[in-house]
Image (tube, grey):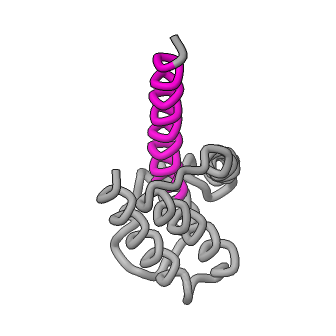
Amino acid sequence: MKIFNVVFCVLFILFAALQWNDPDPYIWMPIYLYGAVFCALAATGSYYKGWYLFGILAYLGYAIYLFFTKDGVLDWATEHHAENIAGAMKASNPWIEDTREFFGLFILIIVLLVNFVHASQKKAKKMRKKMMKIG
């Protein structure tokens, strides 16, 4: 888990840095840095289930919005035949930007979910050990 979290911490910092020239860096830089901070904390053995859950729910809500909004992921898949979204750095069409943002959120959700599950399992294991000492 330490390697997993260090890798994603670095990736999320890089993702945040790439948002500098984006039309809305004030939204996306904090989103990626949130993931980076909690990956860094998890890499040191500090897990915060409540904050993972908060991030998962917030990002899931935003991802659902980006999926269904006009020029969102659904439009990209159906009306634009899943056009290549990685062909150029600059998003020339609105559905490219929204689709990229959706997949960025998807990655964040998965990473936070992995840490949430790991923290839950770690807590359950600790509780079982405690119960064994009592019993």
The x, y position of residue 125, in whole percent, is 45, 28
Q: Is residue 62 above or below residue 33?
A: above
From the viewer's perspective, tell me whether residue 12 is left or right of residue 6. Answer: right
At 45% from the left and 24% from the top, the residue drawn is: 129
> Does residue 5 lie above or below 53 as drawn?
below
Residue lying farthest to the top in this orientation: 135
| Position in image of residue 18 (x %, y %) | 47, 82
Task: Name the dominant secondary structure of the magenta segment.
Answer: helix
The residue closer to the viewer here, 124 or 38, is: 124
Q: 109 or 115, which is in the foreground?
A: 115
- Using the image, determine if residue 63 lies above or below residue 135: below
Evaluate whether residue 80 shows in this view.
Answer: no
Q: Position of residue 24 (x, y in %)?
A: 66, 79
Is residue 73 on the magenta stretch? no
From this viewpoint, which residue is outermost toward the bottom? 21
Residue 10 location, quadrant: bottom left
Q: Residue at x 43, y 67 (%)?
A: 9
Relative to 5, say whether 111 is above or below: above
- Magenta span contains residue 124: yes
Report the span colored magenta: 105-133
Name the residue at 29% across, 59% down: 3
Residue 68: percent from left, percent from top:
66, 46
Residue 35, quarter of picture:
bottom right
Q: Is residue 102 visible?
A: yes
User: For the view shown, which residue lies furthest in the left direction?
Assistant: 3
